[in-house]
Image (cartoon, coloured by chain):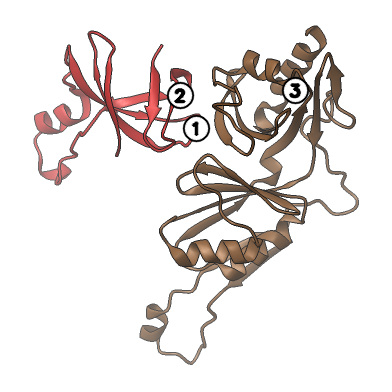
């Protein structure tokens, strides 16, 4: 379903010059979820990471499939932008390299002007709700189909991260709540420390087959 | 390998996360149609490639994806400074 929405509707009787002074924000809202007769499929459906996950020797990886992922960009110095998001999401925007945790969503810091919202609520409704509150110069993109989230846990979970990435994952450098985007098995992943032994990995759909098989290979042989 | 401090993430990261883009502070001629072939060619193709201190534009491509300047010594590989663009 695609809805074309004009947030500032103009009256046809207005003079053309008047119309030019008010710039309506036109955007397309698309519900990317399939309808009932087409099954949704996770990008790692063919690997052991889907469903119950894979576990061995103190490392467990399981996919958290079909979450809604929304990328939001805007100016951090624009108070209207910040308060609009915080009102719509009922959450604070996180500081640099930090996350905010809500009841249904997590907001990850990605870049000084970019954040990722991952929520178990419907992407279409979340996007519509955000767009209703937001105005001015911003970007909001539904990337739910383009990436997926994996949950890595267990007392040896750090060993998988050490093998995959050059980053320092020690607690002194990577406290709970921190998030980074870094190299992961030569591909890319957003890595968030959820608790001491729990990590969230957000990976691209295009790399998910390779990464899932890499992770499986590591866990089986560790 | 370099260990580069991203001025936007404000921490040191491994070189694998970055890509070198070009010499820093290149100024595009304000009137491309009006400049001579030599002027345009020099802007497009010719770089200083200094031995010693050099300013380069890098991008934190696997990370915050921001462009920034690195001032480094091409002889000793010492990184003198990184700054936002």
Residue at image x 64%, y 13%?
A163
Q: Is residue A147 above or below residue B19?
A: below
Q: Chain of mark 1?
A: B
Mark in front: 2 vs 3: 2
Q: Which chain is red?
A: B
Residue at image x 68%, y 20%?
A158
Tell me the distance, in whole angstroms, between the alpha carbons under discs 1 and 2: 9 Å
Residue at image x 46%, y 49%?
A113
Q: Position of residue A65 (x, y in %)?
A: 80, 39
Task: Say the numbered circle drawn on residue A149.
Answer: none
Which residue is denoted by mark 1 in the rendering? Answer: B63
Q: Which badge, 1 or 2, is on the more N-terminal residue? A: 2
Circles 2, 3 touching at the beta carbon (< 8 Å): no
Q: Which chain is brown?
A: A
Tell me the distance, in whole angstroms, between the alpha carbons under discs 2 and 3: 25 Å
Mark in front: 1 vs 2: 2
| Residue A210 in which image quadrant | top right
| Residue A152 in which image quadrant | top right
Question: Count the marks: how many?
Answer: 3
Residue sitting nearer the eye, A169 or A28: A169
Circles 3, 1 touching at the beta carbon (< 8 Å): no
Circles 1, 2 touching at the beta carbon (< 8 Å): yes
- On the rendered image, what quadrant is the C terminus of chain B found in? top left
């Amino acid at each position: 379903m695609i809805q074309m929405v004009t947030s500032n509707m103009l009256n046809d009787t207005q003079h053309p010059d008047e119309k030019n002074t008010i710039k309506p924000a036109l955007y397309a809202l698309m519900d990317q979820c399939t309808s009932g007769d087409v099954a949704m499929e996770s990008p790692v459906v063919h690997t052991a990471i889907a469903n119950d996950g894979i576990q061995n020797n103190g490392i467990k990886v399981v996919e958290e499939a079909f979450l809604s992922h929304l990328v939001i960009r805007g100016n951090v110095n624009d108070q209207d932008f910040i308060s609009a998001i915080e009102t719509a999401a009922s959450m604070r925007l996180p500081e640099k390299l930090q996350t905010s945790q809500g009841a249904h969503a997590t907001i990850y810091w990605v870049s000084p002007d970019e954040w990722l919202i991952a929520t178990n609520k419907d992407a279409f409704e979340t996007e519509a709700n955000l767009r209703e509150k937001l105005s001015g110069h911003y970007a909001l993109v539904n990337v739910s189909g383009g990436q997926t989230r994996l949950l890595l846990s267990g007392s040896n979970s750090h060993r998988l991260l050490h093998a995959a990435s050059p980053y320092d994952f020690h607690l002194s450098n990577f406290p709970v709540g921190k998030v980074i985007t870094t190299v992961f098995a030569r591909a890319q992943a957003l890595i968030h420390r959820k608790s001491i032994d729990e990590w969230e990995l957000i990976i691209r759909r295009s790399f998910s087959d390779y990464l899932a098989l890499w992770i499986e290979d590591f866990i089986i042989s560790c | 390998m370099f260990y580069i401090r991203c001025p936007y993430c404000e921490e040191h990261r491994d070189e694998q996360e970055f890509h070198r883009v070009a010499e820093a502070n290149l100024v595009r001629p304000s009137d491309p149609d009006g400049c001579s072939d030599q002027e345009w060619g020099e802007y497009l193709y010719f770089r200083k490639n200094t031995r010693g201190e050099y300013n380069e534009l890098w991008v934190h491509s696997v990370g915050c994806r921001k462009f920034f300047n690195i001032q480094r010594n091409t002889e000793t590989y010492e990184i003198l400074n990184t700054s936002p663009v």
